[in-house]
Image (cartoon, grey):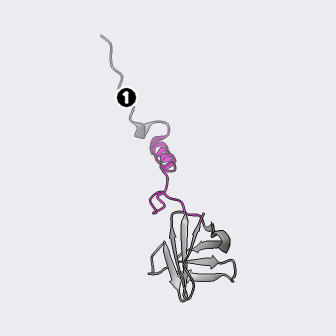
Amino acid sequence: MSTIKPVHDLRHGPLGLFGIALLAISVAGCVAADSGNGGKTRERVAAYNCGEDGRLTVERRGASVILTQPEGAPVELPASPPGQTARFGEAPYALVLEEREALLMKNGSAPLTCTR
């Protein structure tokens, strides 16, 4: 009759609890962090082509963006309303970012639609 050898308890092996902890840390490092935006990555700086009207550059800065227009100096626009990640504005500007499009509205001017 053969004897069945007991399986060693991992807690008492050569590595003990240290080995288990090391394994847990190694595996935890393999999990991708959630970016909070549904798996979509957001570029920090994006350039949009506005056809004959030139290009817009939008740089994300947390709760605001820096908008650089073809004819003007950079303008900082806060999220509107606060906490928003697609709509920004402060008189006389309003900017809406959606997927690969940017819609820029300025008081007294026709809306400008630009694409990446």
Q: Nearer the viewer, residue 48 or 10?
A: 48
Q: Quadrant of residue 115?
A: bottom right
Q: Nearer the viewer, residue 53 or 20?
A: 53
Which residue range is magenta in the image?
15-43
Which residue is depicted at the point 49% across and 79% down?
Answer: 79
Residue 22 vertical position relative to residue 111 in the rendered view, above or below: above
Give the left or right position of residue 75, taking residue 78 as reference: right
Which residue is depicted at the point 46% across and 58% down?
Answer: 34
User: x%, y% of residue 82?
Assistant: 45, 80
Local crowd size for mark 1, using a 10 Å CA cut-off: few (<14), some (14–19), many (≥20): few
Which residue is depicted at the point 32% across and 16% down?
Answer: 3
Tell me the quadrant of the picture where the N terminus can be found: top left
Q: Nearer the viewer, residue 37 or 88?
A: 88
Q: Quadrant of residue 44?
A: bottom right
User: x%, y% of residue 80?
Assistant: 47, 81
The answer to whether residue 29 is magenta is yes
Q: Residue furthest top?
A: 1
Which residue is depicted at the point 33% across and 20% down?
Answer: 4
The answer to whether residue 19 is magenta is yes
- Number of disc labels: 1
Q: Amino acid at mark 1?
A: Val
The residue indicated by pointer 1 is 7
Q: Nearer the viewer, residue 111 or 79?
A: 111
Give the left or right position of residue 56, taking residue 89 as reference: right
Tell me the quadrant of the picture where the C terminus can be found: bottom right
Q: Residue furthest left?
A: 1
User: x%, y% of residue 22?
Assistant: 50, 46
| Element under disc 1 | loop
